[in-house]
Amino acid sequence: MQRVLHLPSIHHVSAYVEKILSWAVALLLPVATYTLLIRLAVYFMELLYEIFIRYQY
């Protein structure tokens, strides 16, 4: 059985994968950072809200 699909060389594939990974990191890192910051902000707001309500009574 003859292969119709000629796979590119390993070096070419690894360079392509590295490029994809670098793009993925560049795109996902800011998103993850912003998500973390927003979650921390929400957590602190809830904490302050709890403290505020407790000191009201």
Image (cartoon, rainbow, N blue to C red):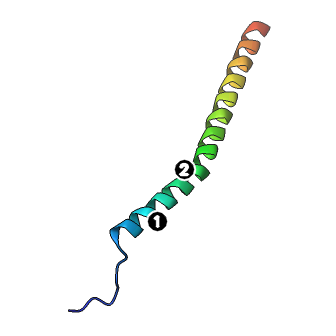
Residue type at numbered disc 2: Val
CB-based contact (under 8 Å), mark 2 and mark 1: no
Residue 52 or residue 30, whichever sits in front: 30
Q: Which residue is mark 1?
A: 16
Which is nearer the N-term, disc 2 or disc 1? 1
Identify the image quadrant of the N terminus: bottom left
Residue 33 screen position, x and y as percent: 62, 38
Is 25 left, or right, of 15 in this rendering?
right
Quarter of the image for residue 10 reads bottom left
Residue depicted at 46% across the width and 65% down the height: 16
| Tag nearer the camera, 2 or 1 | 1
> Any mark on residue 7, and which?
none
Q: Is residue 21 left or right of residue 57?
A: left
Q: Residue furthest right?
A: 56
> Could you tell me how far apart the alpha carbons at marks 2 and 1 are, in whole angstroms?
14 Å
Question: Around disc 2, counting alpha carbons within 10 Å, would you say few (fewer than 14), some (14 to 19), or many (20 or more)?
Answer: few
Secondary element under disc 1, as helix, strand or loop, is: helix
Write the residue at 56% across / 56% down. Answer: 23
Q: Quadrant location of the C terminus?
A: top right
42 or 7: which is nearer to us?
7
Looking at the image, which is closer to me, 17 or 56? 17
- The amino acid at mark 1 is Tyr
Q: Position of residue 8 (x, y in %)?
A: 37, 76
Q: In the drawing, what numbered circle is on residue 25?
A: 2
In the displayed structure, 36 sits above or below 48; it is below
On screen, residue 21 above or below 33? below
**Residue depicted at x 69% and y 30%:** 42
Indicate the quadrant where residue 2 lies.
bottom left
Secondary element at image label 2:
helix
Q: Residue at 68% across / 19% down in the picture? A: 47
Percent of width and height locating residue 25: 54, 50
